[in-house]
Amino acid sequence: MEELGRIYLCIKNIVDTLRQKSRPYLFSNSLAPALVVACLKALEIINNNKNLITKLHDNTLYFREQITEIGYEVKGDSHPIVPIMIYDAKQAVALSEMLLEKNIYVIPFSFPVVPKNQARIRVQLSSSHTKDQLKHSIRAFKECGKALNII
C-alpha cells in the first residue's frame, strides 16, 4: 500500500509539472463565453445588414488607393487590414507616434514580428469609418510621412 502511495505521488508530480510546463496544455485554453457570444452577435449583425460589407469594401478600396497615391507602398490587394510599408523600424514607430498626436491610432510592426527591414504600419479599416475620417487620416499620413522623409 505504501508503494502505491509513492507511485501515486510520483505520477501526480509528473502530471502537475506537465500542466505547468507543457506548451500544448498552456496554449489550448478555450474561448471565454462572453467572447463567443460577442462573435456570434457580430456575425448576426453582418448577416442582417449587407450594407456593412459593402461600406467596408468601399472604405478599403478608397483608403488603399489614396494612401498609395500620396506615395506609400501598400502590401496586399483588397483586405481591410492595410500594411503600409515603412521598412525602417524606428521610422515606423516615429510615424505611429506622430499619427497618434493627430488622433490616429495605428500599430507599427517590426522584427521579430515581421522580417528584418520589413517594418510597417498596420491600419485597420471598418465599415463605421466615415469618408471624412478617412480623408483626415490620409492627410495626416501625408503630413507625417513628409515630415519624416518617408514619402
Image: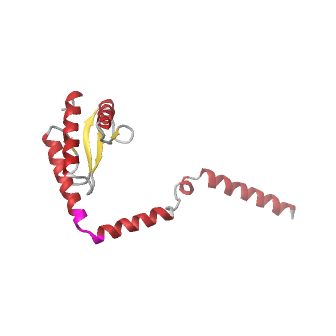
- The residue furthest right is 2
Q: Residue at x 20, y 62 (%)?
A: 54
Quadrant of the image for the C terminus? top left
> Is 5 left, or right, of 83 in this rendering?
right
Q: Could you say where residue 82 lies in the image, as x and y percent from the top left?
A: 26, 48
Q: Residue at x 68, y 55 (%)?
A: 16
Q: Which residues are magenta?
A: 47-53
> Is 6 left, or right, of 57 in this rendering?
right
Q: Nearer the viewer, residue 116 or 55?
A: 55
Q: Nearer the viewer, residue 125 or 24?
A: 125
Q: Nearer the viewer, residue 102 or 19?
A: 102
Q: Can residue 43 be seen in this snapshot? A: yes
Q: Residue at x 60, y 50 (%)?
A: 21
Q: How is the image coloured?
A: secondary structure
Q: Could you say where residue 63 lies in the image, as x and y percent from the top left?
A: 19, 48
> Is 92 left, or right, of 69 in this rendering?
right
Compared to residue 39, the image places residue 137 above or below, namely above
Q: Is residue 52 magenta?
A: yes
Q: Is residue 10 magenta?
A: no
> What secondary structure is the magenta-colored segment mainly?
helix
